[in-house]
Image: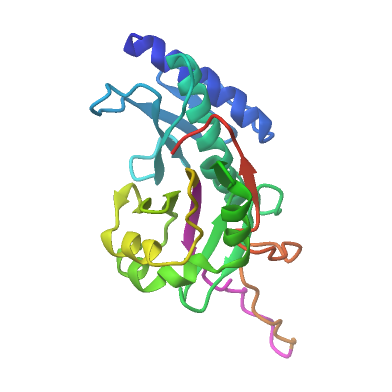
Amino acid sequence: MRPQDRLAVIQRCVVREMARLGQVFRVDGEVVRGPGTTAVAVREHLGDDGGAGHVDLGYVLQLGRSDAPVVWDCAAGLGKTEEEKLANAVRMWATTTASALVELAEGGGRHGDHADHPELPGWHAVQGPAAVFGFGNERLAGWLAEHRVLPALAPALLPELAGPGPNGVKLFLGGKAGDDVAEVRVNGVVSEAASAALRSLDWPRGERLCWARLFVLLTTREPAVPPPAPAGAAVPAPVRASVPAAVRARGLFGRWWQARRAGR
């Protein structure tokens, strides 16, 4: 498939998947524009296989600003044709990564979960659904729902986080007994220490292949600074910004999604 054809397929899939998240995106040249100043950029994936089935997508938070944060993530999909592989890769990205970004913007708890962990002081976590796929995926999904994975990785993650964020943390784990894989990427770069910490956890390794993919956004949380109160007036208690009070923690890895034809 020619690069321009790959780009067109990926962009069409981004528009479709973002619509499933209630977001109106449209193709505009090299990017896919979304609500406000958001956009999704696509860059060519370089690899031994020529990029077949892989997508590199960057979620732009403030299009037009040279210093605007861009959350990049790579995903891969399976399928019989390259177009099918690309479509499944974009679906995987939308399920795990884009869901977290939309939740970060909206803050209503519809697309992801929120959590603050003592092990990550000063950082607020937002995560979309976990994508769990392969044989016997219920065991791995259940383990993820019951265990606090992010705090276990905190000592390795903290030195690699840059404020105020958002920092994108991708976790990929699974395989089978004797042939497992555990990889953690922080802002697109493999963290050897966090990957080793993830591998040391006792998530289930079965006799058949099964994987999970998760994406977490970590941002700093600053207390809101109220305006000076008039003399003699009661001073209201400080309010913590970022997450509406209506959002209730449901377990950071409690949401999961099954896929028969999806990838890393």
Residue 198 position, x and y percent, is 40, 62
Please state which of residues 190 and 224 is positioned toward the viewer in this rendering.
Answer: 190
- Which image quarter: residue 13? top right
The quarter of the image holding the C terminus is top left
**40 lies above or below 152:** above
- Which residues are the magenta region? 212-232
Residue 141 position, x and y percent, is 60, 53
Residue 120 is left or right of residue 137, and the answer is left
Magenta stretch holds residue 215: yes
Q: Residue at x 46, y 13 (%)?
A: 81
- Which image quarter: residue 233? bottom right
Q: Residue at x 32, y 63 (%)?
A: 196
- Which image quarter: residue 225? bottom right
Q: Residue furthest bottom?
A: 232
Q: Residue furthest front?
A: 207
The quarter of the image holding the N terminus is top left
Residue 86 is left or right of residue 159, and the answer is right
